[in-house]
Image (cartoon, grey):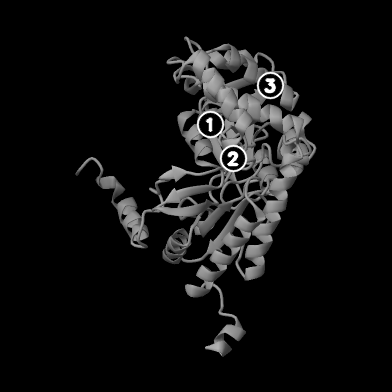
Amino acid sequence: MGLLDRFKAQRELHAQVKSCGADPFGVKMEKILSATEALIEGRPTILCGSNNYLGFTFDADCIEAAKETLDTCGTGTTGSRIANGSYHDHKALEQDLADFYGMKHCMVFTTGYQANLGAISTLAGPNDFLIIDADSHASIYDACKLGSATVIRFKHNDPADLDRRLGRLANEPGNKIVVVEGIYSMLGDHAPLKEFVAVTKKHGAYILVDEAHSMGVMGKTGQGVVEHDGVLDQVDFITGTFSKSMGAIGGFLVSNIEDFDILRVACRPYMFTASLPPATVASVRKSLAKLRANPGLMQKLWDNVDTLYEGARAAGFTVGAQKGPVVAVHINDPALAARAWRALLLNGVYVNLALPPATPSGTALLRCSVSAAHTKEQLQSVVDVLSGVGRELGILPTPAHAVAAE
């Protein structure tokens, strides 16, 4: 048996997807033109799959902060946080984030994936229980594999099922840690955090909320669903990323728990990874400061969400049940979804193709993400192209007047 023979099924599925005429998982951005446009296959293309929710990737102040720090601190730290990888701005960013969330403590990681991997695998010990939402992100599942706790899944966004499963653990020794996300990255639905927190506290458990897709998106000041649902002071841990609303890369963990700093020498993904480049830290500090100074940035995002979400729904597409910056367009057949993705790209619109088994319930999706940097004209163009492709491929019915004209 060959070393990679076990991936035969994935290879065959990938080949089927590529039969649409391109590899949806290997698209090359030949030139980035702005926060919302790029050259792909030589064509100017609207980027509607970038997660650049506030458009900070091309913010002039963020770029300038990165440039200045590049000149003074160089291209990288070449070391982990516990060796030679903690610079002044790493500590300053941790203080900024702690202040933003009103928490006492913060750790900054090199990626959002590592924040979940490190926090979850370290917090839950061999005699503990992790109770996770069935639709959790891969980083959460991988954290469960890395750790030694017993893992229990509950039905997606179902407080009653969480209550039942915690109830069965009532007489079991060990800590119970519930892990949920604020906004789920595929379908874009929001967790009912108020109900989850109530159930968690009823059973004396801890709760960790991953706000990767909701930081800078929800809540009066952009703290996420924890703020939107009024439970910020009741959650035990929040993780998040800088690769969405903050326009860069990195991750964090904030908490009020006592003895927090012991995690710095217990968390392997924190200890054994080189720290964030100082220029990236500087850009994130600037983007966070801009969000805090002007939370009204989120209103432009939500106005744009309305344009794409309502436009796609009015055209006849099935979209996610809850409105948000992730607009999931449901296409029942994976092969048809791949053809639709390719047709969109050929018409100057880039979205993400999301297929089983990465998607919940085996659903094939055209996963669109909205940015505050999009113009109304760009998003209307996306709706128009999406509608045209939908009719061309038979996903949407042809309007009666168009049939009559033929």
Identified by mark 2, the residue type is: Ile
**Mark 3–mark 2 distance (CA, rounded to whole Å):** 29 Å
Report the residue marked by disc 2.
132
Identified by mark 1, the residue type is: Ile
**Vertical position of residue 47 compared to residue 181: above or below:** below
Crowding at label 2, few (<14), some or many (≥20) Cα neighbours within 10 Å? many
- Give the mark, 3 or 1, whose residue is nearer the N terminus: 3
Residue at x 58% of width, y 32% of height: 242
Q: Which mark is residue 96?
A: 3
Residue 163 percent location from the top left of the image: 70, 43
Residue 315 percent location from the top left of the image: 63, 69
Q: Nearer the viewer, residue 189 or 158?
A: 189
Report the residue marked by disc 1.
249
Q: What kind of element bears circle 3? A: helix
**Vertical position of residue 379 compared to residue 200: above or below:** below
Residue at x 72% of width, y 52% of height: 303
**Mark 3–mark 1 distance (CA, rounded to whole Å):** 16 Å
- Give the mark, 3 or 2, whose residue is nearer the N terminus: 3
Crowding at label 3, few (<14), some or many (≥20) Cα neighbours within 10 Å? some
**Mark 2–mark 1 distance (CA, rounded to whole Å):** 25 Å
Q: Quick check: can you spot residue 33? A: yes
Number of dots carrying numbers: 3
98 left or right of 32 in image: right
Q: What kind of element bears circle 1? A: loop
39 left or right of 242 in image: left
